[in-house]
Amino acid sequence: MLRSARVHHTQGLTLRELQVLRLVASGKTNKSVARELFISERTVDRHVSNIFDKLGVSSRVSATVLAIKNKLIDAPV
């Protein structure tokens, strides 16, 4: 039961997708995200695509707004 509550709370996003989303929401490019997380740019592209699919959005701005509204991430400062 706890697991399903957690999945619902995170909209099904993995921990890595949440990390990527936080960085994208702070305005970082895929290249910057890749460097910071020590992964390839292609992997970041894939994570961003998965994030968009899971959140039902088609832009970084929409993903950011939805994530903040649903308390998946804190508002960037």
Image (cartoon, rainbow, N blue to C red):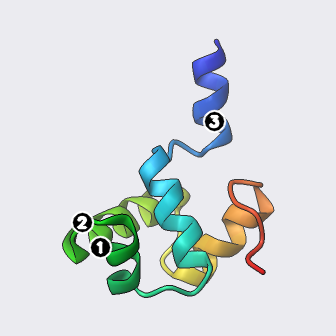
- Residue 18 in sight: yes
Q: Which residue is mark 1?
A: 45
The mark closer to the camera, 3 or 1, is 1
- Residue 50, by quadrant, is bottom left
Label 3 is placed on what type of residue?
A: His
The image shows residue 47 at horizontal and vertical percentages of 35, 62
The answer to which image quadrant residue 77 occupies is bottom right
Q: Is residue 12 above or below residue 58?
A: above
Q: Nearer the viewer, residue 4 or 15?
A: 15
Q: Residue at x 32, y 85 (%)?
A: 31
Q: Residue 3 location in percent, x, y?
A: 58, 20
Labels 3 and 1: the sequence-earlier one: 3
Residue 17, percent from left and from top: 45, 55
Q: Is residue 77 left or right of residue 63?
A: right
Earlier sequence position, callout 3 versus callout 2: 3
Query: Measured from the top left, where is residue 11 in percent x and y?
Result: 58, 45
Quadrant where the N terminus is found in the figure? top right
Secondary element type, mark 1: helix
Q: Secondary structure at mark 3?
A: helix
